[in-house]
Every structure is written in structure tokens, then in C-alpha cells.
Amino acid sequence: MKITNVQPIQADAAWTCYTFVKVETDVGITGYGECTDWRAPNAVAGGVLDMRPLIIDQDPMAVTLLTAEMNRHNQQAPGGTMGRAIAGIECALWDIKGKAYGVPVYELFGGPFRDRVRLYWSHCSSYRARYPELLGTPPLRTYDDITNLGREVVQRGFTALKTNITIPGEPAEVYATSDGVLQAGVLDKITNLLDAFRAGTGNDFDLALDINYNFKTRGASQIAKILESYNMMWLELDTWEPTALKRITRATSTPICSCESVNTIVDYRPFLDAKAMDIGMVDIPWTGFAQSKAIVDLAESHDIVMAPHNYYSHLSTFMAAHLCASSRCIQIMETDVDAAPWRDEFVTELPHIENGHMIIPDAPGWGTDLNEQAITDRPWQGQIPTGLIGKK
């Protein structure tokens, strides 16, 4: 079997762009991967094209060798945007290998540890604050609207959600900083938001708050402290400094989750060695499947549980489910419920969700393919729409 084509495919996803990779072979087996990075979609797609000459005419079953060759080509700048392009290609190769053997990808990594994985509704309130007209959802004008959203999450079978610092109003907004400083009044906004969600979800429900890169060590520590009475699933934050993260984690009883943006095992290891967080995140479209699995296994050796980062298309959700299936130390898996209304059209099979859990697929490869005609009907236009840049 030989690789005959490697192609980036990009789809309009409203406030983002989904970037996929299609790898074709001379025996008619096609593999798909995802490497979405909405901040740099043109660069990621270009990276796929730059890597294409390295693997055309090669054996797609030699996934480890081909991935090593691509990483060697990128060895002066590991990870980053080019690393994400490599991850997308690698994931497409695993899809091919699973299809060639007639088995799910997780069977190539030791078989399933579980047949379903618990989900949390991510960006809950965040997207509805910004895009209610597009989503066809009620605007979030008051904290009562947040409470009603909490009730909806429970009614739809979920037992956990993650939100950002959403401030209801006309219009609602999602709070962010440019200087990392915790300003006066922000702590009250956080507690008002969580109180409203808790009123809707009840106490037997997991809440998580994601503050991204918005606050430096002092501000993040203050937020963690005021969350201690909420029995949070976690406070999620991003930093490139393991020592600073460890300082936050050790100073609070609030569980700390981090490292979604750390995309190589070499960069991830210092966080694990320092026991810098309670829960680690790993991103398959940015890291690749095999390296994500290696990071998860390394985390287990450090007694740290993991949760896949996943706010992309349904293809990524299937990829994350395979990681959860083949790994033991998985706490829960992220999924976006609110998304471009046409997202479901882009895949041939949808995630099977029951009672807040995704059933692990058992079809060969990832268990779903891209609907390329649907993507052709909604092509990426080449730039993030004006007004959406800088928002997540």
C-alpha cells in the first residue's frame, strides 16, 4: 500500500475554521485526521502541504516511522503550528491503519479499557453569550438566564459543565484581560456566575471554570481560593511556567487543571515531574494520537489523571474517545454542545451520547468519516469573520 495524496480540507464553522487532513492510498483506503487551530488555519493547512512530499509514495502503515520523519523535518521548531499539521497527518494515518486491519484505532493501542466515557458540556454560556442569534438560543441577559441554562444541561443528561467568566447583559460578554491582572469586582462576577449555575444544576453536579491565560499567578491563586467552597470539578488555567502552576496548585484545595497547550512530551514532562497540577489536559489535534497516549501514560506514572482537550469538530470527538478508550487514568472528556448549526453535516456518523456519556465507537478507524460534499458546500472563506478574532 502506498500513499497517493495528502490534502488539507477546511470547513466554515461560523466563528472558527475546522482544519482536517485527508490521506489517500492506492488501494482505495482513505484516512482522516483533524488539526484545527482557528488562530492560524492558513498556517496549519500550509504545514500539511509542506509535509506532503515527505510521505507521498510511502507505506501508510509505517505510522511511527513517517511521524518521526516529519518531526525530524521540524526538529528546529518542535510543536507549534507545524507540529499541529504533523498531528493531523499522523491521525489520518492511524485511521488508515485501523481501516486496513478492520479494527478501531484503540485496538492498535492495547484495546479498550472502557466502553463509554463521561462528558462535560464545555464553553457552557460562553458561546451563547457571544452568538445567540447564530445558535438560535435565548440571550443571556440576567443571572436567571444562566440558571435556566444550568437546568437545560441537567435535562439533557449531562452531569458536568465548564464555563468561562460570563457576564450576563445586553449584550452578554465573556470576560478577558490583556495584562493578566485581577481587577476589582471580577471575583464577585465569578461567584455570581457559579451561584446562578448551581441554582440550576443542583449540588449533585460538577462545575468547572476555565480562565485560560487571563491571569498571572497571584490572580489565579485568588480565584482558586474563593472557589474552595464550591466543591469544583476544577479550576482550569494556562501557563508555560511549571513552578508558577505548582505554586497555585499547592496553595488551594480547589483542583487545578492545566496544560492543554503543551503539545510535546518533552515540554509536558517538567509539569508532571513537578506535580504542577491535579488534572492534566492533552490535545490530540495539536499533539497527535501516539504522543497524546504517551503523555497520558506518563501522567499515570506520576499519579495524575487526564482529560482530553476537545473543542473542535465531531471528528476530533471520535479521536478523543479512542484515547479515552485506550487509557486508564481518564477523568472525563470535553465536548462542545453549542457549535455552528451545520456541524453535524460534516461527518458520516455522529457521536452516540447517552446520559452524559459517549459510547465508544467500534467501527474500523475512528468510526466516522468526513462528508466532503457537505464541507464543499460550506468552504472556509480564508479568514476569521471580523469581530471574532481573539475570542475562544
Image: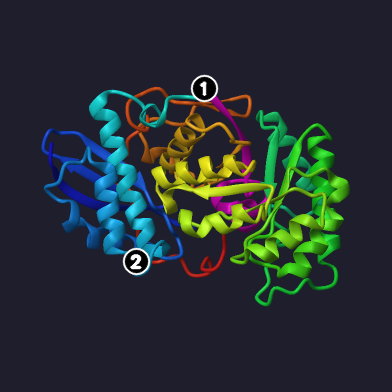
Name the one closer to the observer, 235 or 152. Answer: 235
Q: Amino acid at mark 2?
A: Ala
Residue 303 locus on image (x, y percent): 64, 41
Q: Is residue 130 magenta?
A: yes
Residue that numbered label 1 is attached to: 115
- Proximity of marks 1 and 2: CB atoms separated by less than 8 Å: no
- Position of 322 with respect to 150 (left or right) is left
Q: Nearer the viewer, residue 243 or 138?
A: 243
- What is the quadrant of residue 44 in the picture? bottom left
Q: Residue furthest bottom?
A: 179
Which residue is tagged 2? Answer: 43
- Closer to the N terminus: mark 1 or mark 2? 2
Name the residue located 21 percent from the left edge and 50 percent from the top edge.
6
Foreground: disc 1 or disc 2? 1
Q: Over which residues does the magenta segment extend?
A: 115-137
The residue located at (81%, 58%) in the rendering is: 251
